[in-house]
Image (spheres, grey):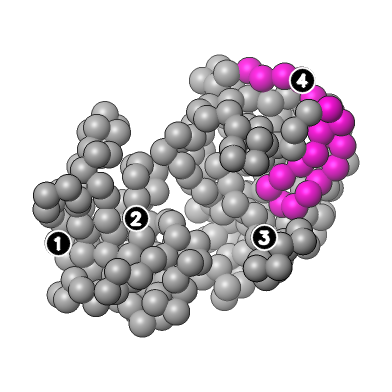
Amino acid sequence: MTASAGDSAWPQPDWSSLEPGPEVVIDGVVDGDTVELVRGPDVRLVGTQAPKLPLGRAHVTEWPLAQDAKAYLQDLIAAGGRDAQLFFGGRRTDRHNRHLAHIRLADGTWLQGAMVLAGLARVYTFADNRSLIGNLLSRERLARDAGRGVWDHPYYAVRAARDHDALLALVNHFELVEGVVRSAAAHRERWYLNFGRTWREDFTITIDRAHDPVFESSGFSLAALEGHPVRVRGWVMEDGGPMIRVDHPEAIERLTAASTGR
């Protein structure tokens, strides 16, 4: 797969909503969501997760299409130029001291947007980095509907909330899960969005009540999700049944009934 100009047809992100960072020169590509600079720390393409490469880590198995994602990012940079500017929309560095930034190439290409639109990265959100996620989700939706890149591979299939046994086999995997919220209730210090009759066995989304303010400030009502189909993204955990823990609204998409049969 080679880089194309398809991203140019999309509206540019609102760069004014971000904090301009330094102008940099890209030296190389580590994987589909990380680049090296001529000077300074590596840059993690915040808001995205490309298929992973082991990169010398014995506990990491190469994900399908990881080489394709790396090659596509290299093609984007070759086409758009190594000169770039960083933009920050939240936390600026990670625990590895990498920049957490959006990257705009000299030709105007937004690397995050281009990778997601090509289907070679999924949207990957954090409570402390939520900028431009709506734009990225729109691009992801188009790529998924078109079956581009990862969306044409079973490893990255959107999972059904009702298939709790299959989800248990995916503990410690980052997944997108769709289903209808059977019940939404707050108990003591936590919200529970249950997708089955037996909450100890069926799939559940949990949200600590400490995160209520961020949901409320976004006008996002967890209680109002009861009876509605949603798509959630996150790392699958086991707590009796399969569970995804959420701490910000962008991790949960409210769907129309026609958009999911799960």
Q: Choose mark 1 or mark 3, whichever is in front.
A: 3
User: The residue tagged with tag 2: helix, strand or loop?
Assistant: strand
User: From mark 4 to mark 1, how far is it between C-alphas?
Assistant: 49 Å
User: From mark 3 to mark 4, how far is it between C-alphas?
Assistant: 27 Å
Q: Is residue 149 visible?
A: no
Provide the residue designation for mark 1.
183
Q: Choose mark 2 or mark 1, whichever is in front.
A: 2
The residue type indicated by label 4 comes to Glu
Residue 29 belongs to the span the image colors magenta: yes
Give the label on residue 245, or none.
2
User: From mark 2 to mark 1, how far is it between C-alphas?
Assistant: 16 Å
Q: Determine crowd level at label 2: few under 14, some 14-19, many 20+ residues with C-alpha closer than 10 A.
A: some
User: The residue tagged with tag 3: helix, strand or loop?
Assistant: loop
| Coordinates of residue 234 in the picture (x, y in percent) | 43, 57
User: From mark 2 to mark 4, how far is it between C-alphas?
Assistant: 36 Å
Image: magenta residue range? 20-39
| Coordinates of residue 256 in the picture (x, y in percent) | 30, 56
The residue type indicated by label 1 comes to Ser
**Going by the image, does 57 lie left or right of 90?**
right
Provide the residue designation for mark 4.
23
The residue type indicated by label 3 comes to Lys
Q: Choose mark 2 or mark 4, whichever is in front.
A: 2
User: From mark 2 to mark 3, how far is it between C-alphas?
Assistant: 22 Å
- Residue shown at 66% from the left, 20% from the top: 21
Residue 179 belongs to the span the image colors magenta: no
Provide the residue designation for mark 3.
52
Secondary structure mostly taken by the magenta-highlighted segment of the chain: strand
Q: Are marks 4 and 1 in contact (CB under 8 Å)?
A: no
Q: Earlier in the sequence, mark 2 or mark 1?
A: 1
